[in-house]
Amino acid sequence: MSAHDHTHVRPWRMIERRKSRQIRVGKVLVGGDAPITVQSMTNTRTHDVDATVRQIHALEEAGADIVRVSCPDVESTVALKEIVRQVNVPIVADIHFHYKRGIEAAMAGAACLRINPGNIGSADRVREVIKAAKDYGCSMRIGVNAGSLEKDLLEKYGEPCPDAMVDSALFHANILRDNDFHEFKISVKASDVFLTVAAYQALADAIDCPLHIGVTEAGPLRTGTIKSAIGLGNLLWAGIGDTIRVSLAADPVEEIKVGFDILKSLGLRHRGVNIIACPSCARQGFNVIDTVAKLEERLAHISTPMSLSIIGCVVNGPGEALYTDVGFTGGGAGAGMVYMAGKPDHKIGNDDMIEHIVELVEAHAAKAAVV
């Protein structure tokens, strides 16, 4: 047990996940008792294979479990075959209206098709796409968005609302189920946090498939992160959500980082260094904000779950260090105390502190990886 693993004795920290059936997205399991997966989407032109593969590799390095790629035309599905060959994560092909793109993407090696079966034409066309998905081991995601609901539902309900979104999701799900296809997950996203959460809460009660959760078009990095944390945090805390995408107008790598941070804050997934730091004040024995920024950058490559506390003075420092793997608390005379597994270990000067902490964290991560 690590120094910060105390969840088993604190029932108020336990989240009971909604019981969903499990599906497979390539080699990744989604739903059931599988870890909640984090995904993002490329924003390169898909037919530019090199640029798209480069971006997927960056997402893999950040920890992405699944990556979605848009396939709007034949050039994209042709490129997809080459892209899939060069990456490790399962690829979801984003298909909107053209059934042939769905068939081509399945044949090209997509692990999942993001598709609304009701949008791709006749029952025969739907059956063709489903047959291709079955033949090539593809799952599907039904993606309902508040901004693109069916006209009849908007006429019925007057505006996008939770009931309209759930009706749309179940309509598409029934098309798949009527064709004996059950390897699907559903999303019901809106840019409005209230609408998003209410729609997912209703959908969670209405169907047992895994749910892909996200606040769509959440906005720029800071405000989009806040909206996503509120919306996804509410759902995840209630046990709803099997795979997540944080939609930011920012580098897709940022979406993965924010996704993991949300999961880490709820104890649902652990990856990399969780830095606990004070906001700093006049009592600080060193520049906390500058130090934390440098450490975050220097430790970004570490995937081993562990915790690090960086606290400016002795008011809260020793108490926070008690529950972290490595800690540093500011003191006087240009030096501070290093804590290991909650206990005071040795002093180090502020000037040498960043390099020293990076070495300690890397050593701890290497040791944990061997165990």
Image (cartoon, rainbow, N blue to C red):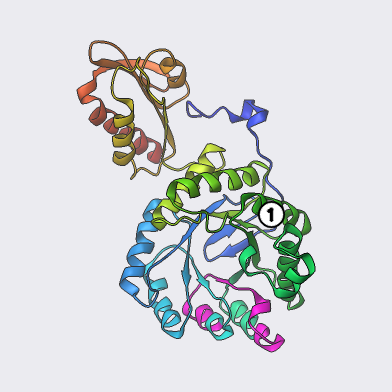
Image position, residue 268 (x, y; %): 57, 42
Q: Amino acid at mark 1?
A: Tyr
- Between 180 and 48, the one lying in front of the other is 48
Q: Position of residue 194 (x, y in %)?
A: 66, 49
- Looking at the image, which residue is at 58% across and 43% down? 230
Q: Is residue 222 left or right of residue 175?
A: left
Q: Position of residue 231 (x, y in %)?
A: 60, 47
State which quadrant residue 367 falls in. top left
Spot occupied by residue 54 in the image (x, y as percentages of width and height) = 32, 64
Point out the residue furthest to the left here: 351
Q: Check disc 1: other Cα within 10 Å, few if <14, some if 14-19, many if 20+.
A: many
- Determine if residue 125 is in view: yes
Q: Is 271 situated left or right of 198 in this image?
A: left
Between 119 and 179, the residue placed more toward the observer is: 119
Relative to 42, say whether 354 is above or below.
above
Q: Locate residue 131: give its quadrant.
A: bottom right
Q: Residue at x 45, y 55 (%)?
A: 64
Determine whether 282 is above or below 241 in the image. Answer: above
- Judging depth in this view, the residue of 2 and 339 nearest the camera is 339
Indicate whether residue 126 is drawn in magenta: yes
Part of the protein shown in magenta: 103-127
Provide the residue designation for mark 1. Answer: 200
- Is the C terminus in the top left, top right, bottom left or bottom right quadrant? top left
Q: Is residue 183 left or right of residue 38?
A: right
Q: Is residue 55 magenta?
A: no
Q: Is residue 362 visible?
A: no
Quadrant position of residue 10: top right
Which residue appears at 60% of the width and 52% of the height? 34
Q: Secondary structure at mark 1?
A: helix
